[in-house]
DNA sequence: GTCTATACCACGATAGAC
DNA sequence: GTCTATCGTGGTATAGAC
């Protein structure tokens, strides 16, 4: 690939992760990448398309790995609640362990939590979510689809917030490596999936 | 309070919630509030201090209600794992039900998830987190503080992501009211707190 | 005390020279 | 493919009207 283009992607990934998309200026990016301002618009067309390229470059491989891990459960015939841990793991571990660079984790976290990507997020994550949903439905057919979708939503929120967390976030705590944190997160979410469905919904008050 | 000041707070809260802090311009705010640009710097001094005032105005009362609900568990002497649901509820319900305006919920969600407020977040939420931590430790003394802090971290992430979610987020799903979603979230998190601690930590590989 | 008018430099974006 | 110049808009600051 073009060297300038790659330097821009690296610099943008770092700064987007550190400060967020909106708070990062193109001039910060070109200063870090040591290229000309106009080269961004030559190679990418706009700041938003640069963001999209940054996302696709790293999230693509991560999602491939997630899907590969989820493949194991496509052939599962019988319900098996114990497998929930494994399908949660398939989504969490690739995101938290694929890249040793903690800066990239922050970027991933921001991508999930910042309200950007109204469209690009769907293109990038919807297939994964659908596969996860069908896998979850297979091992836990007793849970309604509505509840499963919300559980996935809660999972994404917890994961995004954790990806954004850096060791220095909790000064009082002993710093832990990513895999230990990942284990804590996977356990928390797996047990969340064991929660029974909220049956009683609010009804219109008639009097 | 001053009318101009209040109009600015309202407009800023709306736009920060809709587009995020960095993506919102002061000129958007003064256009919506129909006031002069310089009035922001007269009343608040800067965009960042405006954000702080917006946060304090609404989050203050919410946190007061949360603390009041947590007060019930200050006198708890004996461990009681079943009470976890109640202390989780004390944090979730005030945030999700105090204001019927869905726009404010988005703002609250962004406040938790956007990486802003390096200092203001601590001032605003640390006391609450400490109280929650001590309440959680009281009903679940079998869990280490490290694990409890991380569980709280996961809880905040799931809650923030849920506050940001709007009914239209999942087009395939039947729209649900906030209290139903809150119940699902509380159940998910409460069960997450029941997850046993991850004992085995990664150790240095010696060879 | 409260607000208006205006100026400042950095921002994203674009056109055109090389 | 790369760079310079430039445009409209962003946050910020201040002088002065009321």
Image (spheres, coloured by chain):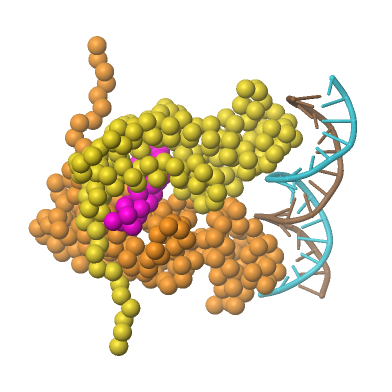
Chain colours: A orange, B yellow, C brown, D cyan
Residue at x-position 40% and y-position 30%: B65
Measured as percent of width and height from the top left, residue A140 is found at: 16, 51
Which quarter of the figure is the C terminus of chain A placed in? top left
Quarter of the image containing the N terminus of chain A?
A: bottom right
In terms of image quadrants, where is residue B198?
bottom left
- Nearer to us in this view, A18 or A176: A176
Q: Is residue B54 above or below residue A32?
A: above
Can the viewer see residue A125? yes
Residue A64 in the image, given as x and y percentages of width and height:
34, 68
**In the drawing, does residue B124 fall left or right of residue A187?**
right
Residue drawn at (38%, 71%) of the image: A98
Total numbered labels placed on residues in the image: 0
Image location (x, y in percent) of residue B171? 35, 41
- Toward the top, the furthest residue is A207
Q: Nearer the viewer, residue D16 or A14?
A: D16
Instruction: From the viewer's side, name the closer residue of B50 and B105.
Output: B50
Highlighted magenta segment, given as a residue range:
B144-173
Residue B103 appears in the picture as rendered: no
Instruction: Characterize the magenta stretch by its predominant secondary structure.
Output: helix
Magenta run includes residue A151? no
Q: Residue at x 24, y 48 (%)?
A: B140
Residue B182 placement: quadrant: top left
**Left/right of residue D12 with respect to residue B19 in the rendered view:** right
Locate residue A147: give its quadrant. Answer: top left
Who's the residue at 29% across and 59% down the image?
A184
Q: Is residue B149 magenta?
A: yes
Query: In the orientation shown, which residue stands out farthest toward the bottom?
Result: B207
Give the left or right position of residue A98, taking residue A29 as reference.
left
């Amino acid at each position: 690939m073009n060297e300038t283009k790659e330097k821009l992607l690296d610099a943008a990934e770092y700064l987007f992760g550190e400060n967020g998309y909106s708070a990062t200026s193109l001039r910060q990016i070109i200063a870090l990448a040591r290229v000309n301002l106009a080269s961004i618009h030559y190679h990418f067309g706009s700041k938003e398309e640069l963001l999209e390229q940054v996302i696709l470059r790293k999230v693509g491989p991560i999602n491939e790995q997630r899907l590969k891990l989820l493949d194991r459960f496509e052939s599962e015939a019988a319900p098996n609640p114990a497998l929930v841990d494994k399908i949660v793991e398939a989504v969490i571990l690739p995101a938290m362990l694929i890249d040793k660079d903690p800066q990239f984790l922050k970027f991933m976290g921001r991508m999930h939590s910042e309200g950007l990507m109204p469209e690009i997020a769907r293109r990038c994550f919807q297939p994964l979510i659908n596969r996860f949903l069908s896998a979850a439905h297979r091992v836990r057919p007793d849970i309604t689809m509505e509840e499963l979708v919300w559980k996935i939503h809660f999972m994404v929120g917890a994961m995004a917030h954790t990806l954004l967390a850096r060791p220095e976030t909790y000064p009082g705590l002993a710093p832990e490596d990513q895999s230990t944190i990942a284990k804590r997160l996977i356990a928390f979410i797996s047990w969340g999936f064991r929660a029974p469905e909220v049956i009683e919904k609010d009804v219109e008050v008639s009097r």
